[in-house]
Image: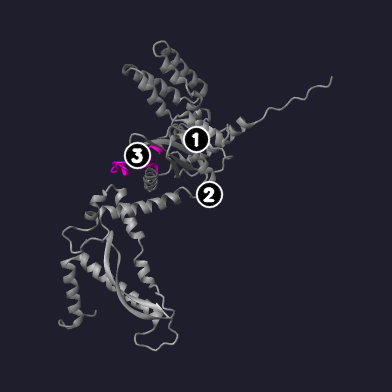
Amino acid sequence: MTRDITPAGSPAIGAVDEAFAEVRASFDRFCLAAGIEALGTMMEADVTAACGPRHGRDAARRAHRWGRTRGRIGFHGGKIEVERPRARGVDGREVTIPSWETAAQEDWLGRWAMNLMLINVATRRFGRAVRLPEGDVPAPPGSGVSKSAASRRFVALSAARLADFMAADLSALDLLVVQIDGLHLGDDLVLVAAIGIDGEGNKHPLGATENAATVQALLDNLVSRGLDPTVPRLFIADGAKALSKAIRRTFGSAAAIQRCQIHKARNIMERLPKEHHAATRRVLRQAWELDDADKAEQLIRNLARRLDQQWPGVAASILEGLDEILTVVRLKLPKELRRSLACTNIAENMMGTIRRVTRNVKRWRDAGMALRWVAAGMIEANKGFRRLKAHKQLSVLRAALQAHHDRMTIKPVAHVARAA
């Protein structure tokens, strides 16, 4: 067993005591000072590599020292001023210092801004979120912690993320299900977003468009990014007729479309007096739980017939799109899988994250701003996605979709007319 025999008054002990004194005074200040010192060492090594040793006579050098200047780098979501060396090449041009270029990258500040805004820190409070008001790290003008600076960085990074998001390759994804749902932002702005489920049950946000009337643009974008329109898939939508038409126009008339049963029930209840809600919900639930699509359809038609005399509008609403309401039943999917795929709950969950992310936005200036925020919210939602509960049954869905596609696309055999 060895013992430390360093004298109590040695320089090493004095340096350690001084360091701990700085830590006790301000840990932030200590980390900042240590970081600046480390960065200075790296920059000096870069300059020496380009210029050779100081006061040396190295004939192979490709630059020479050119004094020092001050520049800003990111720290705790803002910027601080740091002194850095300069070097000029033999041709008189400025030589970049690799360690300084890396430290000065603006992306770190953008990621700070985006992260804080996605967890609902308002831009006017950004400075307090990254710097303590009573702390020893100052935040003078130009330090990049103002609300306008944070907003500019968020706009720049979210625009870049949106461009990457809407151009991501989908050809490698084995998507079996595509859910499409709408989202209202403000009074007049409606966005449509899509989310896919692959053969392993993993969920993937696919994209968004700024107007429900231009949902065709979203579908065209998915196809252009590698979503094969000839592969049988299940499309789950909120019930808009224009959406069903766009899906069949893009993916063929044989596309399997399931209208959201929750949206359907909600639309029916809005037209019925409250005293009839419980009985109507009970019939609808009974029909959706049946394994026989013909019996389920007959049950719903009987309900519509009973309501037709008093509320003909409700009866028409019940029968509208009836074939698409029972798609998962006609595919003969297992009950657990049917419950997961009979509605747009997965898309609604993603929409909930988008609403939370965007709740601090008071005024939507244009559709471009909305798309940036929605893309950021979809990326944020993707971090919390879990596999589909019934993912082990997706092989049944694959086989059922292929059988449905074959049945819907088979061409009748033409009979050869007998010779006279």
Label 2 Cα neighbours within 10 Å, binned few <14 / some 14-19 / many ≥20: few
Q: Is residue 213 magenta?
A: no
In the image shown, does 287 or 266 lie closer to the viewer?
Answer: 266
In the image shown, does 305 or 340 lie closer to the viewer?
Answer: 305
Name the amino acid type tagged 2.
Answer: Ala
Q: Which residues are magenta?
A: 347-367
Q: Which residue is mark 1?
A: 235
Which quadrant of the rendered structure holds the C terminus? top right
Q: Residue at x 45, y 18 (%)?
A: 316
Q: In terms of image quadrants, where is residue 13?
A: bottom left
The numbered mark, 2 or 1, whose residue comes first in the sequence reads 2
Q: Secondary structure at mark 2?
A: loop
Label 3 Cα neighbours within 10 Å, binned few <14 / some 14-19 / many ≥20: some
In the image shown, does 301 or 389 lie closer to the viewer?
Answer: 301
Q: Is residue 357 magenta?
A: yes
Q: Residue 149: give x, y in percent of width and height.
A: 29, 55
Looking at this view, name the residue that lies furthest to the bottom: 57
Residue 292 visible in this rendered orientation of the protein? no
Q: Which residue is mark 2?
A: 172
Q: Secondary structure at mark 1?
A: strand
Q: Residue at x 39, y 78 (%)?
A: 88
What whole-number distance in Å separates the C-alpha atoms at marks 3 and 1?
21 Å
What whole-number distance in Å separates the C-alpha atoms at marks 2 and 1?
19 Å
Q: Residue at x 15, y 82 (%)?
A: 9
